[in-house]
Image: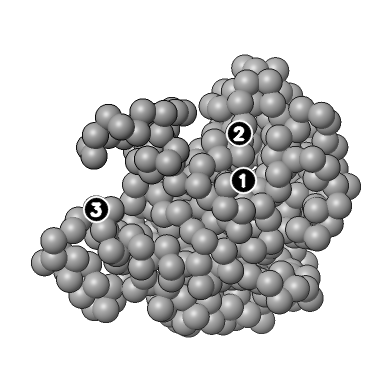
Amino acid sequence: MAEVLPYGRQSVDESDVAAVAAVLRGDWLTTGPAVDRFEADLAAWTGAPAVAVTSGTAALHVAYAAAGVGQGDEVVCSPMTFVATAACAALRGARVVFADVEDETLTLDPAAVATTARTRVVAAVDYAGHPADYDALRRVQGDALLLADAAHSVGGTWRGRPVGSLADLTTFSFFPTKNLTTGEGGAVVSADPALLARARRFRNHGLVRDRAEQRFPDEGGWHQEVHEFGLNYRLPDVLCALGSSQLRRLPAFKARRAAVAERYRDGLADLPGLRLPTRRPEADPVWHLYAVRVLEGRRRALYDHLRAAGIGVQVNYVPAYWHPVFADLGYRRGLCPVAERFYAEQLSLPLFPDLADADVDRVIAAVRAFFGA
């Protein structure tokens, strides 16, 4: 039987290993110079200062806390995302208002966004690596903050501006299948000093160490205070060293992902049973997913066919409000018809930097065999 081909996988080489080993031989394992270096390296890519955290989910939780999301607030959210985008807002006590996506990019549709006096955040998601239309979203955000869930899109641009500089707050994920990895890890990016300070504080238990900000500054040199609750979301030096090393390889990762996407397009474009992903001319995406649409109700059959052939396809994602936790809160199917139609057809083909051309051709051949082409 042919080797099982995963739909996503990290790319780690000897330069990454050496970067991690150097930290292990040093004096710091956590909250040391590698954290500062990784945050600076990430800021150079994103155009705004960064706060490293333990996961993409942690990044969302930190961002919503920095935005002041709390009981009684509303957060407008795309349903075409991993559930954490919505769940972290709900965990802060907010009511999540799902707005539909655009059929072309599967990103939040500005025309579907309706804000109220209670809307604290509008949360867009850069689905599959394609940036949302943040210029249009700016025009409809009202008094709310604009958040970019860029778990899929680090390294991408929209109208020449880097992902990370397009919204008030941007969150990243560095899970192994993402565009670069720290093992587990994530980051919050913002050009707003106040938002950034709140994010840094929430990441570290809410501790206040600056004597100028303390209520009891004369307690002693050891003194630290908590003014608002936070959590320990600190990303250790070991993983930040891996992140800095991976960022140096991000241009190569991006180029290879684009080449794989182009090879899929060349090999599958003539199949009438598939609709292939597109990109807008304003976008320079990082192809995190290659999400095809399988027409005429055949998605499940193609999924089973490819899995049986040892090809690790995936479905990304169940609309967030279909999860029972949201259904139990009263959310009903039919809320976002564009997202639901897409989910019924969506299938992610294998895509990662170390995917060889022969592996891409193997996937193409298996898909074509299913359609009898």
Choose between 134 and 325: the one closer to the eye: 134
SS state under label 3: loop
Marks 2 and 1, the one that precedes in the sequence:
2
In the rendered structure, which amino acid carries the disc numbered 2?
Gly
Q: Are marks 3 and 2 in contact (CB under 8 Å)?
A: no
Residue found 50% across the figure and 47% down from its top: 197
Kindly indicate the quadrant of the structure image that contains residue 131.
Answer: bottom right
Instruction: Tell me, for residue 30, which label it has, or none.
Output: 3
In the displayed structure, 318 sits above or below 330; it is below
Residue 340 is situated, as x and y percent measured from the top left of the image, at 74, 41
Kindly indicate the quadrant of the structure image that contains residue 118.
Answer: top right
In the rendered structure, which amino acid carries the disc numbered 3?
Thr
Choose between 55 and 170: the one closer to the eye: 170
SS state under label 1: loop
> What is the distance, in whole Å, between disc 3 and disc 2 at their CAs?
27 Å
Residue 58 appears anywhere in the view = no
Residue found 47% across the figure and 67% down from its top: 42
SS state under label 2: loop
Residue highlighted by disc 1: 81
Choose between 228 and 296: the one closer to the eye: 228
Residue 16 is situated, as x and y percent measured from the top left of the image, at 28, 73
